[in-house]
Amino acid sequence: MPKTLIKVDLSQSAYDNDMVHNRWHPDVPIVAWVDPGDDFVIETYDWTGGFIKNNDSADDVRDIDLSIVHFLSGPVGVKGAEPGDLLVVDLLDVGPVKESLWGFNGFFSKQNGGGFLTDHFPLAQKSIWDFHGLYTSSRHVPGVSWAGLIHPGLIGCLPDPKLLETWNAREAALIATNPTRVPGLANPPFGPTAHMGRLKGEARDKAAAEGARTVPPREHGGNCDIKDLSRGSRVYFPVYVPGGGLSMGDLHFSQGDGEITFCGAIEMAGWLHLKVDVIKGGMAKYGIKNPIFKPSPITPTYKDYLIFEGISVDEAGQQHYLDVHIAYRQACLNAIEYLKKFGYSGAQAYSILGTAPCQGHISGVVDVPNACATLWLPTEIFEFDLMPSSAGPIKHIKGDVQMPISPDK
Amino acid sequence: MPKTLIKVDLSQSAYDNDMVHNRWHPDVPIVAWVDPGDDFVIETYDWTGGFIKNNDSADDVRDIDLSIVHFLSGPVGVKGAEPGDLLVVDLLDVGPVKESLWGFNGFFSKQNGGGFLTDHFPLAQKSIWDFHGLYTSSRHVPGVSWAGLIHPGLIGCLPDPKLLETWNAREAALIATNPTRVPGLANPPFGPTAHMGRLKGEARDKAAAEGARTVPPREHGGNCDIKDLSRGSRVYFPVYVPGGGLSMGDLHFSQGDGEITFCGAIEMAGWLHLKVDVIKGGMAKYGIKNPIFKPSPITPTYKDYLIFEGISVDEAGQQHYLDVHIAYRQACLNAIEYLKKFGYSGAQAYSILGTAPCQGHISGVVDVPNACATLWLPTEIFEFDLMPSSAGPIKHIKGDVQMPISPDK
Amino acid sequence: MPKTLIKVDLSQSAYDNDMVHNRWHPDVPIVAWVDPGDDFVIETYDWTGGFIKNNDSADDVRDIDLSIVHFLSGPVGVKGAEPGDLLVVDLLDVGPVKESLWGFNGFFSKQNGGGFLTDHFPLAQKSIWDFHGLYTSSRHVPGVSWAGLIHPGLIGCLPDPKLLETWNAREAALIATNPTRVPGLANPPFGPTAHMGRLKGEARDKAAAEGARTVPPREHGGNCDIKDLSRGSRVYFPVYVPGGGLSMGDLHFSQGDGEITFCGAIEMAGWLHLKVDVIKGGMAKYGIKNPIFKPSPITPTYKDYLIFEGISVDEAGQQHYLDVHIAYRQACLNAIEYLKKFGYSGAQAYSILGTAPCQGHISGVVDVPNACATLWLPTEIFEFDLMPSSAGPIKHIKGDVQMPISPDK
Amino acid sequence: MPKTLIKVDLSQSAYDNDMVHNRWHPDVPIVAWVDPGDDFVIETYDWTGGFIKNNDSADDVRDIDLSIVHFLSGPVGVKGAEPGDLLVVDLLDVGPVKESLWGFNGFFSKQNGGGFLTDHFPLAQKSIWDFHGLYTSSRHVPGVSWAGLIHPGLIGCLPDPKLLETWNAREAALIATNPTRVPGLANPPFGPTAHMGRLKGEARDKAAAEGARTVPPREHGGNCDIKDLSRGSRVYFPVYVPGGGLSMGDLHFSQGDGEITFCGAIEMAGWLHLKVDVIKGGMAKYGIKNPIFKPSPITPTYKDYLIFEGISVDEAGQQHYLDVHIAYRQACLNAIEYLKKFGYSGAQAYSILGTAPCQGHISGVVDVPNACATLWLPTEIFEFDLMPSSAGPIKHIKGDVQMPISPDK
């Protein structure tokens, strides 16, 4: 049995676990050292540290203080890893906590984080998903069930001081272009809710004031929310500090490309079984800036897709220039409209797109002025036939089940 | 044997074939009528009407007048199809012209159309790809070979006058924001090089002056350049005019997601074997705005991917807000840098990403401020092992073969 | 365009084409020579040389003289290939004759060849399958349609005299154990209907009297009827005579594992586009006795199977010892019984199992006394839902369409 | 968390666990009852009840008394299930015991059970396979590693008295044809080592004397050893006794088609998470004799196969009539010969074929007199390139690691 290097107790506050942190900073002390070739287990909180509950109210989604996320387990040091190396990480397996076989998906209020379709779904909503072995289903979203593509939404190595400074500088510059925007353009360092792991006292306060927030993906990987970086895959991470300092969390039982609901995928507490190795000087040898990875041979084989197209003309009919973000939003809205014809509420349809193993493809990015994006919806996850026919759609979903919603206060 | 409704003679100018047109306009006369349930064959020119030649110079790519594209075969009318219906199109098969078993891929000069990475590859370049049964390879890009995912880059129904007006208005508004930009933000109607099929005289001139250019994908589908809309797939197109008026062209032997090289995929002349049917009132029944489709059961099963990540921080280090276009560009640049370590020139690497069955995924679009996009490179297409190892990359490609390049005049 | 080395004229008797032969013998003269690295096209008759017609009578299936089969195109010589080498054959593409877009499937009468389930289907029956681009369907078997997994049923190199003698000796010994069995245990050489290609006169007569029949697969490959040896695959054949002498035919548009209907798959006339190469001394280097191959990246991706089990207890309840043949027969009979519940006749169900891309797995061969075999039926080929449910099966097939049958004379 | 209905303690003899049995008999008392729709967990011993140890000697494989197998957990009763129903079983997940992350594979001595290739490997041998999350590798078989296709080798419902009598009668008749054969043609009931669960006293002795051995697959499923009946699949079992009486065991971390090594797959102790439901009268409704099943969407996606052919001519050159068993043996022997060229011992190669997710296809069963079978070897499981090349094979395996072997006493 592999050794569990970091344990979490779901009944304890994540702030009280000193092998957890929620900011990126080179000074976060490494909490465990391993050798290249070792395999070991790391337990993690869900990204909110247990704030979101398994109930039928979206109040927690509405009320959460997003400055507390993400609670990461680590950093783990790998002996001999030095700046410029590649850290090879095998995700040998990933799973939920045995005593907590459920996850949540939600939409943040536009007043508190928002999301990809926040103009269409501006209020806090939530759905709870239960895990049945390899499968998941929800009491709030009927008619669908699928096998999970389990993965860590967030994993990466500690930045060095220079990289951290680069991050903070460029994000501050972006915020400065519209500092009062709601939701904000980016999240600056914020000391009060920072959890700096084992760092204490003044050193802690200084690092907390500088520590990069964990929300965006960056050069080191971080919060990539890539559904295919799943159990069984092998990832090559850039190393910036001695030992690498690998941290991780934000586990997802399943997610669609884009994690469009932001809160988020099917979020859960869980564990990762990892094996690590080092490629000396790998960053220069292979010209690596961001992590690269090889996907897993064990992934759901859903392949009967219904594919929706979207172009970069927005909901108001305005033309944008090769904007894939808008094109993908249109593809998603098109899919939601389609699913409503079978009886789903818009929120339920949105939740399906955010949580099921949907693919989002950048299909065309050169045919000015329209980008074309496609959303691939796996039809096998539905209990009924979702394809178009001359008879027209059947309302299989009766509307008697709805997702909890919480108006802004 | 199915009937060939539209024939093309590659030795004849596309302008002399009155079953071909290169603008979208409701007045382009339907050239052939079929019944629902019929299957038939349509031949097409390559998108440039034969301008690009099978040789070792990129001068043609540099010098092409892009106002002539795309030469489409059609429109075909389907009896009984009316506005609001869905036209069901089975792409029973698609292939190259038997006497012309090659295709081209290129980069336009930044002065003449540009492309996704035009700032990195500002000059005209070209590679020629030969077809060997199901496979393709290039004398300009060594070390790779793969089975084609053959598809029409462009297919869709004629717009009605109102939709046409919407297109022209919104694109004109975009152009007006920066009318002198090179390359242009969009392409306005342009009568002189318009080919309006069988429309003649004043009616032709009026329509030519209004006809929407074929470059962007739009609500009707059109130039979507979706590699997965391939032979064997079934597409549901919105119908706007009586009979539908289905036109198509821009056949690709293979393409990566995004068609990032713009000129373009592996472009070829060829034929489509189609079957059509109608779902009456399907647009409203299913809430359809853009086409939807079911992919083919016959596609290359490449699945051993090496995946590159990119985030929305541009080459200069500037932070952008959830910009998937920039994130995908970074993922592509990361892949190019990687391939160069194995001996490819940047242009060859770029050409591989544009032509091979690469996937481009919208992996994360909510983690402010960074979008995350991934480029999936199938490793099976390489003659050598492309994975990272502790030994470092081997220069399998010796640099003795290069892609033709033509400096701007 | 690749050169067509062997042409066939479907309106001409196969006996009149001297680039065709129907027996294996080292003296059959090579009709065309190619170099390693060459690619070229070979046309072929269907295996019966056109005896079976596109009509609604099974009389031809009943009356055929099976001593005439299989009409093979070749032999092709590869310069430099010598005994002990491996001939590397890329099946670049395979397809039907453009003017003959149909194939046949049938059951031979038990009096004339029989088949896998001849005790259950003792009379001649036939179904005709039309090709629609990548797809096939039948006017005799409603409710199913699928993409073809096109392949040559028969391909291999000429034997040398010693190997030929081995074949004839061991098969004669088997026949001798029950020489009057109907159908026969094997087919001995038979001169009168032999077609020895360009061999003429006495030499022809001698070789015709010795030439091995083409029915069974043997060390050289030959009539393997392996559905996965399909277009896009690469095969490594043992070489026994100078030049190899590669011959081929018996093209199938589609077939299930086992080709259980014997007459046969969906049989057609067509063409192959091949590329050849040689591995010197490859047989000894790799310890090769029978051909090995790498399957194609382009195959139908059907994967939603319903799987039927069978064990080696026969229809009469008798126990056999680890007999996979009987176990697979039971799995097939179980599937037929199941399909009948949806309205198919037994013959139609049998025809589906013989022609669709079903898999037949040897699941267990050590658990004495029962072998276990499984038949994998792809559910996507059916127009209706084939899975079990608590509501029970629905008779989607109304019984108004039947397969032609011809009683023995 | 689902409830664990049956627990096993690996440190306790399986004979002392009264929720375990090793014979099929209608009188074995049901140990737990569930409702349709329930999900629950069942723990199991490995098939030998812990006899085979994680060490480097094959003595245990040589010395095992095979009359003790298989130790099954159950029977579980499903309320309302009656003879003639179908029991729908979802294998929600299956896994190894957390404290016992290893499995064994071996060959029995020809004197004690033998196996598929017992004439070639007549002595007891063993390899130990360690589990690393989703993957397995062996200290006795270098150079290979793969993701497990985890499944129960044995699962099924209790027979009714009539079915049991049928089994015993037909197997006794077979044994009677050669009662002294080594290994035996089948295994008759054998009371002394029978474990009849909670049945005690005279009832136990009577049932023990009649109880069918668990080795062969039969109408109820049982020891099918079908690798694709894996976690995530749904199985439909015939019901013969009130409540069904579902028992299971013989878990495999991985296995090749045929389980050719007999001892066996990668055998392990573990657990199953199941969900059950009932289709009333399903056996008649669907014409079911043997179980049918739908495979899992979560299976390893290995697909780059090297395929070996075999025909029904045995090692001595003797011709057999359409014997798939012999044809598959030849395909396996051909693969072993090939693997030896890369440095493997024959035993290691045999072990790979028995444990890796190899496919065994019944490719042709009508081309008299030769059946054709194919063995599909996934090349991705090897650390080196296994394909043929003109350079010839490289001895990647140095021969310094061997599998334990134990001569007969």
Image (cartoon, coloured by chain):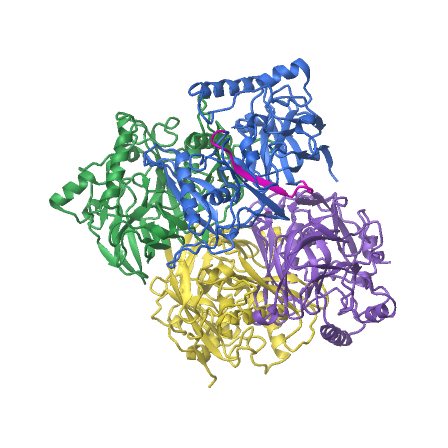
Chain colours: A purple, B yellow, C green, D blue
| Residue drawn 16% across the image and 47% down it | C199
| Residue drawn 66% across the image and 41% down it | D100
Instruction: Kindly tell me whether residue C22 is visible in this rendering.
Output: no
| Front one among B196 and C352 | C352
Q: Main SS of the magenta segment?
A: loop
| Residue drawn 22% across the image and 51% down it | C19
Report the span colored magenta.
D97-111
Horizontally, residue D90 falls left or right of residue A248, namely left
Horizontally, residue B387 falls left or right of residue A245, namely left
The furthest residue to the front:
D409
| Front one among C406 and B3 | C406
| Quadrant placement of the C terminus of chain C | top left
- The answer to which quarter of the image holds residue C356 is top left
| Quadrant placement of the N terminus of chain C | bottom left
Estimate the x, y position of residue A236 in percent, counting from the top left. 62, 63
Q: Height in image: B318 above or below D282?
A: below
The furthest residue to the bottom:
B409
Instruction: Kindly tell me whether residue C91 is visible in this rendering.
Output: yes
| D102 drawn magenta | yes
Horizontally, residue A44 falls left or right of residue C3, namely right
Estimate the x, y position of residue A366 in percent, counting from the top left. 55, 70
Q: Height in image: D117 above or below A356?
A: above
- The answer to which quarter of the image holds residue A318 is bottom right
Total marks in image: 0
